[in-house]
Amino acid sequence: RIVRPNYWQTSNDNTVALSITADQNNYSPTSAELTHYWKVTTDASRTVTGISWAALVPEQGSPAINGWDLTISNVGAQNLVLANASASSDADKRIITGTGANLTVAAGQTVQLIYDADGTTPRWRVLKNA
């Protein structure tokens, strides 16, 4: 169980709807501040190679918060692909899928990630894919 400090709480429900219309490196959606749940649509199969902290916690700046959870639901009709350890994004923004391969989040599927800032390889790690 993750307990969020008070500064993580917002007055909204921590959900944002996002539309991705191009492949994304260091993905930093402007409307995602302090969110933990993204409802994503894409115009075609799109790949995300990493997720930027600047989008989620702008007041933190560059340093990541260990244990930040992020749930992404594909609410569109096209695939969303999370690239595994892609060098197209900065090292601390990369995603580890746990399979060694890219992870396709098909229409109607949800994936849960957590940020692991401990150790020598800070990364987003996939916890669940359903």
Image: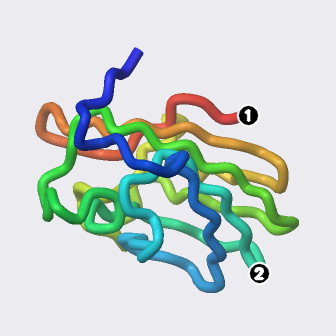
Check the picture and name the quadrant holding the N terminus.
Answer: top left
Q: Which residue is rendered at x = 64% and y = 65% of the image?
A: 17
Indicate the quadrant containing the C terminus: top left, top right, bottom left or bottom right.
Answer: top right
Q: Position of residue 51 (x, y in %)?
A: 39, 61
Quickly name the residue at label 1: 130
Q: Position of residue 79 (x, y in %)?
A: 76, 63
Query: Residue at 52% across / 66% down in the picture?
Result: 48
Q: Is residue 85 above or below residue 99?
A: below
Q: Is residue 50 left or right of residue 44?
A: left
Element marked by disc 1: loop
Name the quadrant containing residue 49: bottom left
**Residue bearing mark 2:** 43
Which residue is most to the right?
A: 77
- Horizontal and vertical percent for residue 118? 16, 32
Q: Amino acid at mark 1?
A: Ala
- Amino acid type of the residue tagged 2 in the rendering: Asp
Q: CA distance from mark 2 to mark 1?
A: 21 Å
- Nearer-the-camera pick, 117 or 2: 2
> Which residue lies most toward the bottom here?
22
| 127 to the left or right of 81 | left
